[in-house]
Amino acid sequence: MKTRITELLGIRYPIIQGGMQWVGRAELASAVSNAGGLGIVTALTQPTPDDLRREIERTRTMTDKPFGVNLTILPAVKPPPYAEYVQAIIDSGVKIVETAGNSPKDFIAALKEHGVKIVHKCTSVRHALSAERNGVDAVSVDGFECAGHPGEDDVPGLVLLPVAARKLRIPIIASSGIADGRGMAAALALGAEGINMGTRFCVTKEAPIHDNIKQALVEATERDTKLMFRTLHNTARVFRNAISEEVVATENRPGGCEFEDVRPLVAGARGRAALESGEVHNGVVSAGQCIGLIDDIPTCAELLERMVRECREHLDRARGWMD
Ligand SMILES: Cc1cc2nc3c(=O)[nH]c(=O)nc-3n(C[C@H](O)[C@H](O)[C@H](O)COP(=O)(O)O)c2cc1C
């Protein structure tokens, strides 16, 4: 395949594994890159910038293909040392960064000076346009279906992508709701030149999470996600389990709630422990609506080959209807 995204990132297939807290480690990133896509190591999964340097080195021992690093810039009372994480990325010679959350504008100059390509992931066309103006090389557009933070606009990919494609000049990567070759074909038809997946990559052999979690996602349907933090204007789409049900119930009680009321339920360490122990109902697990499309646990190589084959078949089939 050849699109502006395969050319920009130096990859065989325009398929990217989005940054994922606790999941985006060397094992998964290298497997995706070895399969011909772009694997991404998640910076903040590493407790310190030096740990990130070590994780990048570990990834290098597992693949000689390009891979990237995700930097999720979220508002926080005590923010992580972002500039030091950026320096670790630059010093390690990584040439692709996926930024997400707030605007990456403070880090663009330093990254570009060192030849790093920047893909900014965002949930609205206005933020994509602003990233384009600030000089990023491509944008990933996350629709309402996505795992994690879909923003507050509630616009699904079927509308968001073509609006973005009409307005942006830099290449667009479709993120959210894609788990098979049909979704990939649709994304390309809507104007994307690549796709980004999170949830689907959690349910692969190489994803470093407990099999019970993968199995729970296989068994889930498209109705099994929950939107929490709506009332706090920081919406997150997560797997429907005892914890996310309790968070939403707390938000909906008379008088609402503050973040402090649910903090113990949603603590990052608790989510991480659930992913590692397989206790599906004991922490927040990010998941997108595409869980309804996932019914097996393939290797990343099997997944990518199958998706590209299916994508071709579905595009050919649709083309046949036009004769
Ligand atoms: C378990 C999990 C953790 C995630 N953590 C992050 C994160 O730390 N930073 C980020 O930018 N996106 C994160 N995401 C979002 C993904 O990178 C991606 O944008 C999203 O999953 C795409 O939607 P999909 O799940 O429908 O494929 C996460 C997704 C999942 C499933």
Image (cartoon, helix red, strand yellow):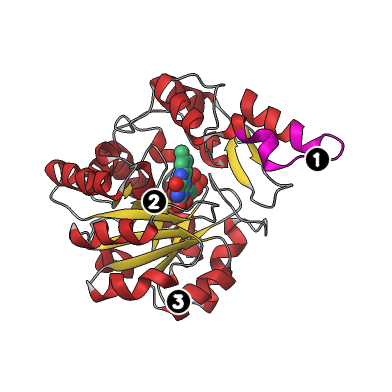
Residue in view at x 25 percent, y 36 percent: 27
Task: Determine the secondary structure under disc 3.
Answer: helix
* Pair 3/1: label in front: 1
Query: Does 247 sit left or right of 131 as displayed?
Result: right
* Pair 3/2: label in front: 3
Image quadrant containing the N terminus: bottom left
Q: What mark, if any, has residue 68 been given in the picture?
A: none
Amino acid beneath label 3: Glu
Task: Determine the secondary structure under disc 2.
Answer: helix
Task: Determine the secondary structure under disc 1.
Answer: loop
Give the percent coordinates (x, y) of residue 171: 40, 71
Q: Please tell me how crowded label 2 is: few (under 14), some (14-19), or many (20+) other residues with Cα within 10 Å.
A: many
Q: Please tell me how crowded label 1 is: few (under 14), some (14-19), or many (20+) other residues with Cα within 10 Å.
A: few
Residue placed furthest toward the right: 254
Give whichever of discs 1 and 2 has the lower sequence position.
1
Identify residue for label 2: 311
Q: Nearer the viewer, residue 59 or 321?
A: 59
Identify residue for label 1: 256
Residue placed furthest toward the front: 78
- Magenta-drawn segment: 250-263
Identify residue for label 3: 132
Q: How far apart are labels 3 and 1 at the CA level?
A: 38 Å
Give whichever of discs 3 and 1 has the lower sequence position.
3
- Above or below residue 108? Residue 209 is above
- Above or below residue 67? Residue 22 is above
Amino acid beneath label 1: Gly
* Pair 1/2: label in front: 1
Q: How far apart are labels 3 and 2 at the CA level?
A: 28 Å
Give the percent coordinates (x, y) of residue 174: 46, 58
Give the percent coordinates (x, y) of residue 128: 51, 70
